[in-house]
Each structure stands twice: as C-alpha cells, then as structure tokens.
Amino acid sequence: MKEVKLTKKQELVLNYIKEYTAKHGFPPAVREIAKGVGLNSPSSVHSHIKRLERDGFIKKTNSKFRTLEVVGINEYDVSKEEAVKIALYKDFSLSSSKDTFSYPADRIPKNEEIFALELKNDFNEFKKNDILIITKPKNYNKYDELVIVKDNSLDLYTVKTKNEVINKEYKIIGKLHELSRKY
C-alpha cells in the first residue's frame, strides 16, 4: 500500500480533530476546526476533511451530529482504565449534575472530592465554556486559589496566610485544581 503524505495543514486539521475528540469525547464541528487551526473558511476545512477521509485517516457517519471519527489509534486519547468520570456542573449552585467529564485518574488528588464546573460566562482569565476542575480539600493552604461565590457571582480568592480564616460572606465551592479549556 502506498504511504500517504499529508500537507502541514492536513496534519494540523487531523491532530486538532484527534486532540479535540480525546479531550471532549466527541469530534469538533467544522467551524471549531477552522477556528482551532487558524483557517478563515469552513470550505477549506471541508476540503481537508474530504482528503483525510479519502486517505483513510478519518471516516464520516451520517447517523449522528458531529459525524467525524478518527480511524485507528488516537494518541491523544486517555485509555478507559486511566480515565474516570467526574460530575460536571453547569452552574455554581452545584444543585444538579446530569453530565460527566472524563478526567485522567492519575491527576486526581488522593482523599479529595473532585468535580468539574462549566462556565456560563467569561470571568477573570477564564472564558465562557471553559471547564474548571475543582477539589474539595479538608483544609486550605497559603496560595491556594479558591473558587468562591460572592455577591451571587463566581470569583477567585487566593489564600494569603497558612491559617487564614476565610470570610464568612463567601461561599467556598472548592479549590481550583486545573483548567480544561474548550476549543
């Protein structure tokens, strides 16, 4: 079988599809690919997708939304044994969670509850739809970045001293563990 040589843009599109799919559990939309790889035209993304499909790197199915599927091994994908599903909340009240988020098991701190919070709006350096990975430790240390609710809105608070008493007007959701940026 003849070896297929991809152009740099095709490689970029393929890697973006693989990484996005591994991170989110579903493939990106054409416009997300265009934005993610710096292309201005969805039609140019379509031509790259057609070439990748023709050469057997991806396949399309007509049975569902976002129909791209990576063929073969996706090196960005965390194996099922290494990933765990954590609760994904859509608002900071943490009142209900119907969704889950795949998160690498080896990045979960021992003896701490962990969950994910998808942002509805931009705040601080975070963007709408970013996912904050939050832990609920038994105590907080100096320099820990806490996710809090203050005046009915989400905010961050950095602990200043080791034994600091946290202001009672804040509702502490937990400690910011990591950010998972959506594309």
Image: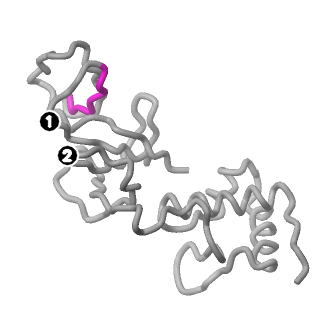
Q: Identity of the amino acid at label 2?
A: Asn
Q: Identity of the amino acid at label 1?
A: Lys
Give how far across and how far down residue 140 sits, in percent: 20, 27
> For mark 2, what is the residue?
111
Nearest the eye: 1 or 123: 1
Position of residue 173 in the picture relative to residue 32 (left or right): left
Give how far across and how far down residue 35 sits, in percent: 66, 50
For residue 124, above or below residue 114: above
> For mark 1, what is the residue?
138
Q: Identify the residue at image location x=88%, y=74%.
A: 3
**Magenta span of residues:** 143-150
**Disc 1, disc 2: CB below 8 Å?**
yes
Nearer mark to the viewer, of 1 and 2: 2
Nearest the eye: 174 or 120: 174
For residue 107, above or below residue 149: below
Q: Identify the residue at image location x=46%, y=39%.
A: 127
Q: Identify the residue at image location x=8%, y=23%.
A: 168
Q: Identify the residue at image location x=84%, y=55%.
A: 8
Q: Residue lying farthest bottom?
A: 63
